[in-house]
Image (cartoon, grey):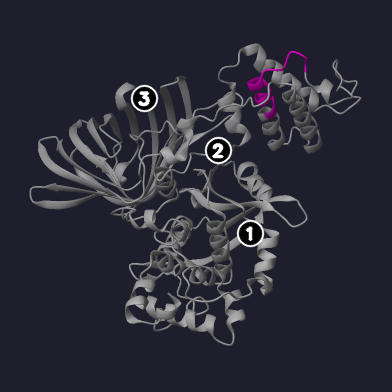
Amino acid sequence: MAAHAGTSADLTSMAAHPVWQALLHLHDGQPQIDDPAFLRSAPDFSAEAEWQATRAALSGPDAEAEVCRMPARYLWLRAQGVVGELPLSRCADWQDFSGRAPASRISLVFASENPAQPSSMMGHLFFKLEGRRADGEEVAHALSFYTDAGTWNLPLLLYESLVTGKPGWFALGPHDETVRHYVVGEGRTLWEYDLALTPDQATLLQAHLLELRSARIRYLFQDHNCATLVRDLLRIVQPVAAASAPASPWITPRRVLREQTARGTPRADRVYTPAAWRVRTLRDGLDHAEIEQALETVRRAGQPQGDTAHEARVPATDTDLLPTDLSGLQALEFTRAWAGLELARGRLGPAQWQRLSTAIDTRRAARPAGESLAVDAQMDPSLTPPEARWSLGRERRGPRDGWSLRLMPVSHALEDDHRHRLGESALQLFDLGLRLENDRLRLQHLVVYGVTSLLPHDALAGGWSGRFALGALPQARADRTTAVAASVEGALGQTLRVHPDIDLYALAGGGLGLHRGLWLSWQQEAGLIVREVGGLKTLLRWRHESRPDGGPRSATHWQWTQMLRLSSGWQLGLEAGRIAQGAQRQRRIGLQLTHLL
């Protein structure tokens, strides 16, 4: 091939190769990284020109320097027979990177969202590199692409993230520190997926990560975020599968996970969970006596050694920390989870937690080999429904009929299947609703950012529910079609799980709106959520607003929603409701078909 690499046909073929396109991060032929330090042919870039420039540099007098600058391009071109053998071993940066962070195994890691943190609302996706260093030590590192979203100024954050772009950085650090940051510091769950790459694939991907380390990369929330960059990196080692991936208006971390599992990547083989999450999930299946025994064990572990103020003093040895009959695997891990939660709350010291955890490890070692707690497959984030969707419906409001159209480029609603979560949740980003009535198209709503979390309250782990919305929100009144006003709303409350498939919730809060003047309203909401067999889901909601649209009279809403999941990509919903405002009443009923993309 090398003898004919310069012909026009070969040049076109090589420049169009999916791996070459992936190495350049091209989308529809356009580079997503336009840093001249990354593209030799800038500003007159083309895939062909970049191929020629790279080949010339790898064949010229400064070839050794070019290998250090672009090791992944060199490795791939050498594998294609385009360039000869060059001494990659002389590249100090490559030796340092591959020596400090060996990558004989590469995994995808997903960090779940925390509704209380706007910057985490889509989750996060990054790589885990594992391997043995030259000194024989097994090490693991996390490599992540991120931007600094450390602001509560949501409008500014959205503007910079969506329009101007924010600076993006790669961070390489010990995986244990990353786990502590997300799991302990932010209360988020980490899910690991082994990519099962060949040694050559792992080396090529690692070499390309080194190429990106010094590149200037813009972070854009909608089309160049952690998920799109990870997807681009996976294209290097999965060129055929990636080329057939369906187009989407918005690439999210969960979408990348769904694509990976569809290609055969096993579901998560390791999960790191916050202590509160494990307390909630592990207490199911334990009887009251086992739970009380675990709580007492942790209480005793938190006492200073030699404390005579208590009837039971802390045992002198780690082994004696655990009662002899506390031996079941689930009970032991529940004890560890409760100790972790007490550690996070400051009621247990790090040394005391470590001592108890060591005792649990010792007790576990005496149990049958290979015994483990199965991870609940329904909680795997790769099983979540797609976020992009559109809905078309027919609706009657009072005597008026109309068509409704809803577009949600990256959202999920309370009506969706949320069995993969600890509690019902909703996320709305640029949720657009339109209504066509009497040949007139009206705006129903535009939610720029909205989040609802109905996490059931737990007697041990606690947990609050709440909602927040920002945008052009509906201000329903009984005497006319719903008005739309620039508004911000928020509420806080609690959810009670009265049955594994039934939740009751209550929220109270307020809203600030601007429409024919500025107004403040108080809001109360209560509801019932029932998860039924056969893909059915029922929601009953009651809401009271003191001054909708700034008017003098309060309004009360009742709404019933019945959702039927027809398939993985289609849902059918039936809604009925009523608004009461003074002597005015307005009834509403509608049928809506939703397609998940």
Q: Which residues are magenta?
A: 323-336
Residue 18, above or below 44: above
- Residue nearest the viewer, comparing 500 with 434: 500
Residue 152, above or below 84: above
Disc 3 to disc 2: CB gap under 8 Å: no
Residue at 66%, 52% (x, y): give it.
131
Q: Residues within 10 Å of mark 1 (few under 14, many from 20)?
A: some
Q: Which of the two labelled residues, at mark 2 and mark 1, occupies the earlier sequence position?
A: 1
- Residue nearest the viewer, comparing 189 with 548: 189
Disc 2 to disc 1: CB gap under 8 Å: no
Callout 1: SS: strand
Can the viewer see residue 558? Answer: yes
Labels 2, 1: front one:
2
Can the viewer see residue 491? Answer: no
Percent of width and height locating residue 91: 66, 73
Q: Which residue is mark 1?
A: 172
Q: Amino acid at mark 3?
A: Arg
Residue at the extreme left: 438
Residue 60, above or below 420: below
Q: Which residue is mark 2?
A: 269
